Amino acid sequence: MRVVTWNLAYMKPSRHKTPANRRRQWALLAALAPDVALLQECRPADLAALAPSWMAQEYTIVGAARPGGTACAAVLARTEHALVAVDGHELGDTSARWLEFLAGYVAPARLVVEGVPINVASVHALAGEVDHPAITAEDHEALRRPCASRAYFNDVAAGALTPLTEDARFVIGGDWNVAALFDTTYPATAPASSQFFAGRQAGGWHHALRKFEPDEVRTYVEPSSAPYELDHLFTDAELHDALVACHVVRDAGFDGLSDHVPVVAEFITRGAGV
């Protein structure tokens, strides 16, 4: 099973949202041949309108923009994997409320790989702490990192998706807008970023790229930015054991298509044992 996570940057400068650029993105995504793709700042209708014509027959996509929005987090999967969106209410009232707050930025779904159900989600977390009445003081206390007084958007996303990860196979990834390097470049907030990753590890979320790269690898390629790894893929322990490769795509063909580059993970699946 090949999983790709990629922010397509539709919400960034106009050059990224042109039909020509989006057509190239979809062509190169097709060339990566994912079984599952976790996409951010994506227009799901582009699968039919701008992707290579055969892709609409071989893939399905779930994800919806916020009211008035044009792009969103989305999950793309081969049709054989029976992809379906997960209604937030399946995850309990609290997760449903948090997912409603994050509408358009988190796309939870479920699919089947060789007979095994796998929960998946594409995440696009805004940067910074949440200051909105939809996230209550009690929510902040439950979700915040030890050194922070309030929860960040990525904390809310992780908390909302936690029920998908309990006693289940899962793949959750996307643009989390957090990097360990933030603790160096923004010392006033340290060690908040390290605490985000420690929290995921404590919750049984295994970081795919760290299995092969002990240090962060740049995925955010805006030239004026520090070399941040903002895109992260997490799995359960069994899928982490089945992970045989994970890398950041730095092929010249992707230059200029987005301010992020894809992360690709390869899993060996063995039917019911995955």
Image: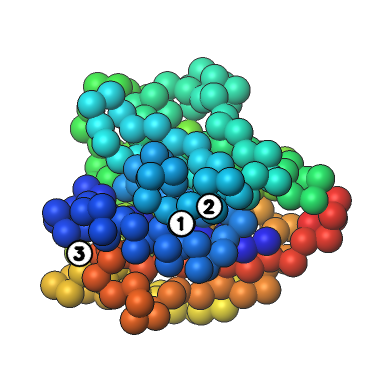
Q: Dividing the picture into quarters, in which one does residue 21 lie?
A: bottom left
Residue at figure coordinates x 58%, y 46% from the top left: 57
Mark 2, Cα crowd under 10 Å, few <14 / some 14-19 / many 20+, is some
Q: CA distance from mark 1 to mark 2?
A: 6 Å
Instruction: Please tell me whether residue 156 is drawn above or below residue 66 in the rendered image.
Output: below
Name the side, left or right, on which 193 lies relative to 111: left
Secondary element at tag 1: loop
Q: Which mark is residue 52?
A: 1
Residue at the spot of label 2: 55
Instruction: Please tell me whether residue 195 is drawn above or below residue 146 in the rendered image.
Output: below
Decide if residue 77 is in sight here: no
x then y, percent, for residue 259: 26, 64
Q: Foreground residue, 178 or 198?
A: 178
The amino acid at mark 1 is: Pro
Residue at the spot of label 3: 186
Decide if residue 61 is in sight here: yes
The amino acid at mark 3 is: Tyr
